[in-house]
Image (spheres, rainbow, N blue to C red):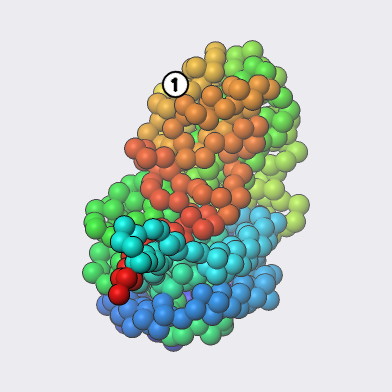
Amino acid sequence: MATTTMTRLFVGGEWQDAEAGTTVEATSPATGESLGHVAQAGREDARRAIAAAKAAFPAWGAGTAFERADALRRVAAACERRRDELARACTLDQGKPIAESYDEVDELVAMLRGAAEDGVRLEGAIPPSMTPGAHVLLMRRPKGPVAVITPWNWPYTMPAEIVAPALAVGNTVVWTPAPSTSVCSGLLAECFAEADLPPGVFNFVPGEGPVAGDELVAHPDTVAVGFIGSTATGRRIAQRAAGKTLLLEMGGNGPLVVLEDADVGAAADAAITACFLCAGQSCTAGERLLVHEGVRRDFVAALAERAVRQSQLGDPLLEATQMGPLNNEPVAAKMDAHVEDAVMRGASVVAGGERAGGFPTDLYWPATILDGVPADARAATEETFGPIAPIVAIASLEEAIEQANASPYGLMAAVFTGDLRKGLRFAGEVHAGLVNINETTNYWENHLPFGGRAGTDSGSGRVGGRHSLELLTELQTVVIGPR
């Protein structure tokens, strides 16, 4: 049974209702039950949050990196104390299995602590001066209030990718989470509140993107915008935030390539994680499997066998469950459409293929494997964002690179091969911000730079470790004259 709650705004160090008193009911994709009501911030609420962040910035930015690191460690400690509560809320609100939710909470804690450590190690420089006796200092300075807008697929780690480094270097934050996971996001906001940060340093305004989110993005007092989500929304944000620092992590259609000399079993194991982790609702998911004709039959058999053992659909609160429901109806409807389109174009259904019955909601989609998918099918060209493994036949490494680069996306790619030279050639020629060799597309270490390749629809800037800290600060040049 779900526990109902009331999710409110956190502005200027205080929990508040929305000015208009508007709320919406949140329901669980897993159970269909009510999780409570969420306050809906309007534009005036967003403006108040921005004003609070602006007022808090001078003192927070002038403090020491060590003080800010201590504050982030307090947030991490609060998340650890509430680990069970956060994990259960994530499963009920997002739909992922409880084991995945615990993993996400643990990664959240690691990100908070990592940002704390990176913040105290961020350095400037002392370049030489052309003038004898003069000295030049390059100082890293915080930018100011940062607007943060995050998606529903990873409701804890996606905010941490931006909020934690922003705070670590002295910026203040106003965060708007995805509406469909605002309940568990509210619990994370409570952890920030429990850490006793100065009022206005961290602000939480749940609401609709075109209202609260748009106000944060376009308001002249936010100097930077961090966004993780769809390409279409990211483009609108880039237009509305013209002239501001932008960190945009957007969509992906990452190929997982299996060449003729690959370890087929290892590639099939990687494809399970690539396609079915978080029910495929990941920007780094293996959205298309480009498999060499010489090993395609063996690969399909290995993948089908593993899917039965490793991707069992069920109640996400049960420890034995390996895959839960999709988060929302539009994603489920996209799965419907992409599978139908692929089958109409000649693909065969190896596993899954339609929504599962007998569950509390209509959002349960089983692990679906499609073989013989045409390269121009929607399941191979668009971001499905569901538990689907579309297998497209290729004849060579060159064809794999060509098909990979035919996509407008450029976030993540992976290749399986027994020849490192082929793997490195693939990495050098494919247009992706991150390339894994003999590893799943869903593998990333959070201290490493991660983001889309320039000229693609996957965004700009990098999250991960010190790389996001550098983006969220600016260099100030200080010249000390010789006299």
How many residues crowd around disc 1 within 10 Å: few (fewer than 14), some, or many (20 or more)?
few
Q: Quadrant of the C terminus?
A: bottom left
Instruction: Look at the picture and state if 257 lies above or below 367.
Output: above
Residue 175 lies left or right of residue 242; in this view the side is right
Inspect the image, locate mark 1, and give the three-letter code of the amino acid beneath it: Glu
x and y percentages locating residue 223 in the rendered image: 30, 66
Residue placed under numbered mark 1 in the picture: 402
Q: Which of 475 and 104 is in front in this view?
A: 475
Specify whether residue 287 is in view.
no
Q: In which quarter of the image is the N terminus?
A: bottom right
Instruction: Look at the picture and state if 417 lies above or below 71.
Output: above
Instruction: Look at the picture and state if 333 lies above or below 207.
Output: above
Q: Nearer the viewer, residue 316 or 473?
A: 473
**In terms of image quadrants, where is residue 378?**
top left
Q: Which of 99 and 437 is in front in this view?
A: 437
x and y percentages locating residue 308 in the rendered image: 72, 36
Residue 312 lies left or right of residue 240; in this view the side is right
Q: Which residue is drawn at 23% across and 69% down?
A: 220
**In terms of image quadrants, where is residue 307?**
top right
Q: Residue at x 53, y 85 (%)?
A: 196
Q: Nearer the viewer, residue 47 or 467?
A: 467
**In terms of image quadrants, where is residue 311?**
top right
